[in-house]
Image (cartoon, rainbow, N blue to C red):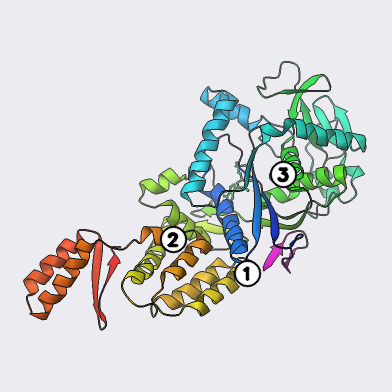
Amino acid sequence: MKLYNTLNRKIEDFKPIDGKRVKIYTCGPTVYSFAHIGNFTSYIYWDLLIRTLMLDGYNVERVLNITDVGHLASDADDGEDKMEKGAKREGKTVWEIAEMYMGDYLDNFRTLNLIEPSNICRATDFIEEDIKLVDALEKKGFLYDTSDGLYFDTSKFPTYADFARLDLDHLKAGARVDFNSEKRNVSDFAVWKWIRDGEDHAMQWEYRGRMGYPGWHLECATIIHEKLGEPIDIHCGGVDHIPVHHTNEIAEIEAAYGHKMANYWLHNNFITIEGEKISKSIGNVYYFSDLNKKGYTHMDYKMWVLQGHFQSERNFAFSDLSAAKQRLLNYRNFAALRWQKDATDLSSVKKAIMEQLNNNLNSAGAFAELDKAINANVPDKDFVDFLDEAFGLRIAETTPDISDEIKQKIKERFEAKKVRDFAKADQLRNEISREGVVLLDGANGTIWQFAK
Ligand code: AMP
Ligand code: ZN
């Protein structure tokens, strides 16, 4: 398998650390509001990654975190905690907010038929372990105390700028005037935040005799260390994570434990909606519930996402979603043939699809291979199951065989046409179409499809 590795900015052959076992970590959602369709693109791409690895015969061990504390409104260490903000907005406790939005996230995750991670870890379940990591950093002399938290001194970690290829001098010049004056370097970041006098922050834990809470990046470093053990094979996240979040995760792990964090880093690009950045003020923040109301399913959206590439910036438009819906229907109608005709040998198509997927997850190329095949071939059950293993579009499940009753009507219609009783044939066709099934008469007899 070839993957574009952000670490080296090039496509590389994937070589796992430990034979057939692959350790993957994907940065998860901050559960302070509903996740919109843009947020879910990354989980759809990583699902494709996991499915491809599984088809290649790997055992995938994947951890997903749920951020339920410590993610501040700005990626720098200021602004309100997103969870606290969500709780105030809705007059609920932070714990209730976390529960509700995590539930919604996981519901959508399952409806999208994304493979469930081996471990889903909530940040707040790892506070003791976070503290172990803070202590390790302290012992090695990477931290300094300020009035608002323990900060990581990035000047003591010489490779800090490497991952994101940061220009630290430039960063310094661009720093805001009201920048936290206790920070030694502009790129320093909070590992642990202190609760200040009068600060209203519901989530807090005691450490060194004071109350505080973990900085955002700490949870990923901790969970990786505890659940998978660094180095892991693949770490995934959005491109926005490269300069701050992932850079800081790497600094924490590598400074504390002296091990490389991950061998491969995959970053998905963003989608825009109808040409604009997704934003509340533009009013183009769509959720799955909005798509469902317009007649599109989670699977239609997943199809749309998989038609593109994780590294490409993409623009979402409802007209494109209609095209994706149609394409998925074409695949279902292809799958319906497995009940009706003798199958063709599709092993070369399967191989071509796998080659595309193994080529840096080129699902668009994989679908192009499938499109070439569907008009002149008939799949068997195994081939349809393979498509579902590769893409998780629930094609088999949504194209069951039709009932015996409809089959009988198709037969009767065929007989009626033979004796030129067209009135009866038409009436039967109407009855069949009321069941959402359309008939296509061709040179090789009649086949049925699902109505568009
Ligand atoms: P947020 O909860 O807004 O911080 O978003 C969580 C993550 O979702 C971000 O860190 C991004 O990686 C991802 N994300 C947000 N907006 C988009 C988008 N328009 N397209 C793709 N991914 C996005
Ligand atoms: Zn993370």
Pointer 3: what residue? 227
Pointer 1: what residue? 358
- Mark 2 or mark 3, which has the lower sequence index? 3
Tell me: is circle 3 under 8 Å from ligand 2: no
Pointer 2: what residue? 320
Q: Quadrant of ligand 2?
A: top right
Measure how far apart labels 2 and 3 are at the Cα level.
40 Å
Tell me: is circle 1 under 8 Å from ligand 1: no
Count of numbered labels shown in the rendering:
3
CB under 8 Å between callouts 2 and 3?
Answer: no
Side of 74 relative to 207 (left or right): left
Q: Residue 204, position in %: x, y?
A: 71, 23
- Mark 2 or mark 1, which has the lower sequence index? 2
Q: Residue 387, position in %: x, y?
A: 48, 66
Measure how far apart labels 1 and 3 are at the Cα level.
27 Å
Side of 239 relative to 297 (left or right): right
Nearer the viewer's eye, disc 2 or disc 1? 1
Q: Is residue 406 magenta?
A: no
Which amino acid type is marked by label 3? Lys
Q: Nearer the viewer, residue 43 or 345?
A: 345
SS for callout 1:
helix
